[in-house]
Amino acid sequence: MAGRNQVRALLDRGLDYDAVGRQLGIPPGQAYLIATGRAADGSDAPPSHPDGALAASQHLANPPYEAPASSESVLDWIAARVAADRPMREAAARRTAEPQPPKAEDPGNPEAEEFSRDVTVVLTRQHNQVRALLEQLQALPSHKTGGSAADLSGRKSIVDMITIRLSRHETTEEKYLWPTVRKALEEGGALADEALSQEQQGTQTLAELGGLAPDTDRFDECVEQLVAQCRKHVAFEEKVFTLLRDALPGDQRERLGRKIETATAKAPTRPNKRAPKKPGAAA
């Protein structure tokens, strides 16, 4: 008679109940009952059978979920395999959440706008890279949802990447974009003031996140706040971009975009708590 330890050992190796049953010479439903103490068909007791065994046709369509990959022994085995395999070690070392930079401009590409230096396109590309990081941040389990040490470390790393990108992005907008908006748009002053107010709120959240450990409830709360602030601000800015495309000629938008690209590479990588609420004249 197969014992529970035998069945569990085979499950830990990654076999399903059908495979366990074949290996031990018993019906899969019986293997499930031995492993879990529950009938696979969801009843409180196994169905009766003349010889006391479970019928081989016992229903297994919807048993409670068993995940052998959650076993510590399976996780240890996976870690050992990775450590012993050089290509896997190298792939793990290269893996990063950092978004890919935009591809080099290809004049023959029909989607040439993707590589345009129009200020609205340049800044939208930056938005898209932050969006990608936010998606990865939200996909990782948090402290509140039981994330592992690796998950929490990954969340902290992604927050650092977002901090760098937003700090550079907002610094260059303060210097070049919002002064232009004030001059070019009829409601430019009000739009710039609202944008800078939103940026100040995001700056405060980033500054607080920088001093928090990822294994705290407050870190998770600040992440949720940052995601909401970023989404609101990006949506607001992209409405402004639509107005700018109508108000500024293409060559002026391109000159401004090139200035922002150059300045972004040299901009500070940490949030500026004293960012100006009203930037000076356009460059």
Image (cartoon, rainbow, N blue to C red):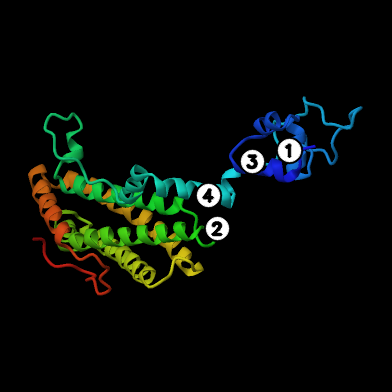
Any part of residue 47 in sight: yes
CB-based contact (under 8 Å), mark 1 and mark 4 = no
Give the Cα separation between the discs numbered 1 and 3. Answer: 10 Å
The residue that mark 4 highlights is 75
The residue that mark 1 highlights is 32
Label drawn at residue 145: 2
Point out the frontmost of discs 1 and 3: 3
Helix, strand or loop at label 4? It is helix
The quarter of the picture where residue 117 lies is top left
Look at label 2 and name its amino acid.
Thr
Helix, strand or loop at label 1? It is helix
Residue 268 left/right relative to 17: left
Residue 229 left/right relative to 199: right
Q: Residues within 10 Å of mark 3 (few under 14, many from 20)?
A: many
First-in-chain label (2 vs 4):
4
Give the Cα separation between the discs numbered 1 and 4. Answer: 22 Å
Q: Is 269 drawn above or below residue 232 in the view shown?
A: below
Q: Is 269 drawn above or below residue 86 in the view shown?
A: below
Q: Position of residue 118 (x, y in %)?
A: 15, 45
Image quarter where the N terminus lies is: top right
Residue 151 left/right relative to 283: right
Look at label 4 and name its amino acid.
Leu
The residue that mark 3 highlights is 11
